[in-house]
Image (spheres, grey):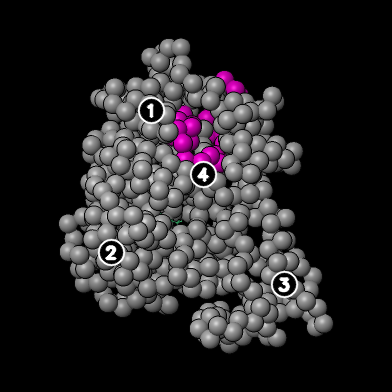
Amino acid sequence: MTSHTSEGTVPWPADLAAEYRSKGYWEDRPLGAYILDTADRLPDKVAVVDGDVRLTYAELADRMDAAAERLLQLGLRPDDRIMVQLPNGWQFTVLTLACFRAGIIPVMALPAHRKYELSFLTELSESRAIAVPDMIKDFDHQGLAEELSESVTSLEYILVAGAANPLNASLEAILAPGPDPDAARARLDAAAPSPDSPALFLLSGGTTGLPKLITRTHSDYAYNIKATSIPTGVTEDTVYLGTLPASHNFPLACPGILGILFAGGRIIMLPSPEPRKAFAAIEREGVTLSTAVPAVAQRWIEHQEEVGGNQLASLEVIQVGGSRLPDEIAYKVRPVLGATLQQVFGMAEGLINTTRLDDPEDVICRTQGRPVSEADEVRIVDEAGNDLPDGVAGAILTRGPYTPRGYYRAPEANARAFTPDGWYASGDIVERRPDGNLIVQGRDKDMINRGGEKISAEEIESLVYRIEDVTMAAAIAMPDPVLGEKLCLYITIKPGTEVTLEQIQDLLRRTGVAAFKIPEYLVVVDELPTTKVGKINKKDLRADIVERLASSSPAK
Ligand code: OOB
């Protein structure tokens, strides 16, 4: 059941791996080692804040190692996978680090995922454990985990943050301090995972079909963290507020939670970006850096305009990315929030671009920045794969020391998303300016980007086809003033039948699909437009929905 990882991953070519090592991009150290370095240097400094919980680096390192040993004692082995579906909190942080120390691979699920996504991901990763909160709002995560363990044969252990049922393990007990930190550290050091081995599985934003897992190795991810820490100016004085789901690459490692812990700063974990709570945390803790998707940045701007005041006085930098930030909003960040904007155009698959803090205002507000590493290779190409000159938009291709060469166990997806010589095609349409900065102009992948949350059109369409009366279905992005995009569904149906939006929403909810993927708008038509080769013409549909919204006579 275990040791499948290397079989399912695509390694970097040996000559490039050697080069990445010799140039120092890959330091050949497991991720946990960086945290121990910080703990040795700054043992008494506060590392993690979550409500009333404050952990110093010494306490964090102690809990990390104690938890790593408890996971192994429980019966998990190095290279086993554990689904992690936890809200932002100290438990997420300690558990993730403990996994890195033990060589157990966390699969970074989102708190919004439900049965449909979790069962698929648990099966694909052959996870032996799942870590969940007991309840969030009204949703019983523990109950869902129990249900999953009945249908997914690999799943043996349920770890629960909060009130664990008698048959499940208490995550707080696993993450408690240990009896002898020095001894635990020595034992774990002696069995440290190989830096080339997978440290974690990130989820793909979804190009086509079902979600894919992205294997990130210790060496490549450590470099991702270090390389993004430089343009963001992270030091031990950085106080970071993490409000986006921490299992996402952006707040986790760009430079995010891990970057701040590498550098010896302080992280404040908050489960939601709701402005009143976020602003209070910024004021209370003297937060200097935070991360937002454009919709959140916009909410923060509106809130600040409404309430005024000095709550954000300490905030120096706000990173915004995940979806395209409209230029008009970008220009408001400095005057309203009093912080420097850093645009971030990144992907869980690797490549991270950022604007630099000392860039001219027009670069910061009108571009999505440039690669963080000199070793990042970027090409902009036309449909035939020819390189395009600066100023002409085309598809972006990339390779580099923290951009893996393929998805986990997905040869077909790999054939589509990667060229034979290892370039990853993200599906974004990008223009490179003569100064090297990139502008994201659009995309040619069949995905909806709902305020930074990615939805694969194909995944939703295949579910909608479960409704017998639906003959054709096309999920497309419709413009939304707040989220940038929302999911709109076009369908054709059998003559004499009726299919409603509520019916579709209901079906998806019952299937256990994450709420952010549920279509918000339905257009029933007699016929869907097709391209010359007979595929549904989504470009026409996107134009159609814009027109319908403008004339505000939607056919529902
Ligand atoms: C981040 O990662 P993912 O994996 O959720 O999504 C990647 C995709 C990109 O291919 C692009 O389509 C879109 O999200 N995207 C942006 C963007 N940042 C990401 N589109 C326009 N403007 C931007 N600034 O979203 C991600 C990972 C690490 C850091 C930042 C974002």
Label 4, ligand 1: CB separation under 8 Å: no
Is the residue 305 above or below the residue 43 in the image?
Answer: below
Most extreme residue toward the right is 496
Q: What SS does tag 1 mark?
A: strand
Label annotation for residue 54: 1
Image: magenta residue range: 73-101
Which amino acid, mark 4? Met
Q: Of the residues under marks 1 and 3, which one precedes in the sequence?
A: 1
Which residue is tagged 3? 500
Q: Quadrant of the C terminus?
A: bottom right
Label annotation for residue 108: 4
Q: Of the residues under marks 3 and 4, which one precedes in the sequence?
A: 4
Which residue is tagged 2? 332
Q: Nearer the viewer, residue 274 or 324?
A: 274
Residue 95 part of the magenta segment: yes
Q: What SS does tag 2 mark?
A: helix
Distance CA(mark 1)–CA(mark 3): 50 Å
Q: Is residue 89 visible?
A: yes
Residue 471 part of the magenta segment: no
Which amino acid, mark 3? Thr
Distance CA(mark 2)–CA(mark 1): 34 Å
Name which residue lies at 36% across and 50% down. 291
> Dot 2, crowdedness within 10 Å: few (<14), some or many (≥20)?
some
Q: What SS does tag 4 mark?
A: strand
Estimate the x, y position of residue 517 in percent, counting from the top left: 59, 60
Distance CA(mark 4)–CA(mark 1): 24 Å
Count up the numbered dots.
4
